[in-house]
Image (cartoon, coloured by chain):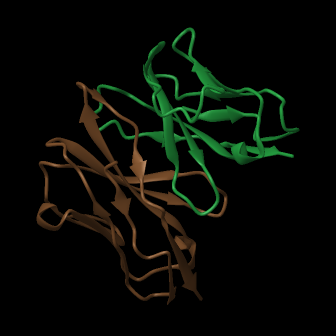
Chain colours: A green, B brown
């Protein structure tokens, strides 16, 4: 069990560019979550998948944000036309739905800086 | 929104002192779960504990203990004999069940704990 991995760890982009982040969950976990964390705040829930189905996406911050998990394994989070306000840490977490309470295990995050 | 409030933004204590981190939550759910996570300076969130709404037993794990009180909607975390390695930001979080499925975690703003040698 290698834990949740995220790539890249850091991304610097210019305003208006599109960015895509990848998350690989713990292998036996069927649920995958995306969060955003800004400085001095707790993580903010964005969306989650159970297998390949996206079960909650109303919390995505705008229509510039989208996520996919096409084969029920890794997931990608895309931000189109980035803005400076998108600068944050993007966290991925995974869990196993049969575990009562669904404790989530987090990856190291991708830090996005929009210049 | 059903909030989680961690009123203590920062706490600083001297090593070996006991310290309690407060957490108050709001919920309209009958079934819900409460969590504590630690975020050390390296940045990765580390799971510490999960509690479900039907189990109000306090829990102790080594130097860590948790006090869950439904009557006051609180889930406080105590570290006894604190150590420098305990220095981190600690987050309290809740998860409810809506529409038959689990939802994401709602986090508090965190408490920055500083343990001075």
Q: Is residue B93 above or below residue A48?
A: below
Residue A72 lies, in percent from the top left, at: 51, 13
Q: Is residue A4 left or right of residue B61?
A: right
Q: In terms of image quadrants, where is residue B102?
A: top left
Residue A29 lies, in percent from the top left, at: 45, 25
Q: Is residue B58 above or below residue A4?
A: below
Name the residue furthest top.
A71
Tell me what residue is drawn at x 70 percent, y 43 percent.
A86
Considering depth in this image, is B117 or B105 the residue closer to the camera?
Answer: B105
Residue B86 lies, in percent from the top left, at: 52, 72
- Work out which quarter of the rendered image holds the N terminus of chain A and state it: top right
Q: In terms of image quadrants, where is residue B98?
A: top left
Tell me what residue is drawn at x 43 percent, y 39 percent.
A104
Query: Can residue B60 be seen from the camera position used here?
Result: yes
Q: Is residue A36 left or right of residue A12?
A: left
Query: Can residue A29 be seen from the camera position used here?
Result: no
Tell me what residue is drawn at x 29 percent, y 32 percent.
A99
Q: Is residue B59 above or below residue B47?
A: below
Residue B70 lies, in percent from the top left, at: 14, 60
Give the total number of marks visible in the rendering.
0
Considering depth in this image, is B60 or A24 the residue closer to the camera?
Answer: A24
Tell me what residue is drawn at x 77 percent, y 29 percent.
A81
Q: Is residue A53 above or below residue B81?
A: above
Q: Is residue B7 left or right of residue B71?
A: right
Considering depth in this image, is A65 or B77 the residue closer to the camera?
Answer: A65
């Amino acid at each position: 069990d290698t834990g949740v991995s995220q790539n890249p760890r850091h991304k610097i982009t210019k305003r208006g560019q599109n960015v895509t982040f990848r998350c690989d969950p713990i292998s036996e976990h069927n649920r995958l979550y995306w969060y955003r964390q800004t400085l001095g705040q707790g993580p903010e829930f964005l969306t989650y998948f159970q297998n390949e189905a996206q079960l909650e996406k109303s919390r995505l911050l705008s229509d510039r944000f989208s996520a996919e998990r096409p084969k029920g394994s890794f997931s990608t989070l895309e931000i189109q036309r980035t803005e400076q306000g998108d600068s944050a840490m993007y966290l991925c977490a995974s869990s196993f739905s049969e575990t009562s309470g669904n404790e989530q295990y987090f990856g190291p995050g991708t830090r996005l800086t929009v210049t | 929104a059903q909030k989680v409030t961690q009123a203590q933004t920062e706490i600083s204590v001297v090593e070996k002192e006991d310290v309690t981190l407060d957490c108050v939550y709001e919920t309209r759910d009958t079934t819900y779960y409460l969590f504590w996570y630690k975020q050390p300076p390296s940045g990765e969130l580390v799971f510490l504990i999960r509690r479900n709404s039907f189990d109000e037993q306090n829990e102790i794990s080594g130097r860590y203990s948790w006090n869950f009180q439904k009557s006051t909607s609180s889930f406080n975390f105590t570290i006894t004999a604190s150590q420098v390695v305990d220095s981190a930001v600690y987050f309290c979080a809740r998860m409810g069940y809506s529409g038959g499925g689990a939802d994401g975690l709602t986090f508090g703003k965190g408490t920055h704990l500083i343990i001075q040698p």
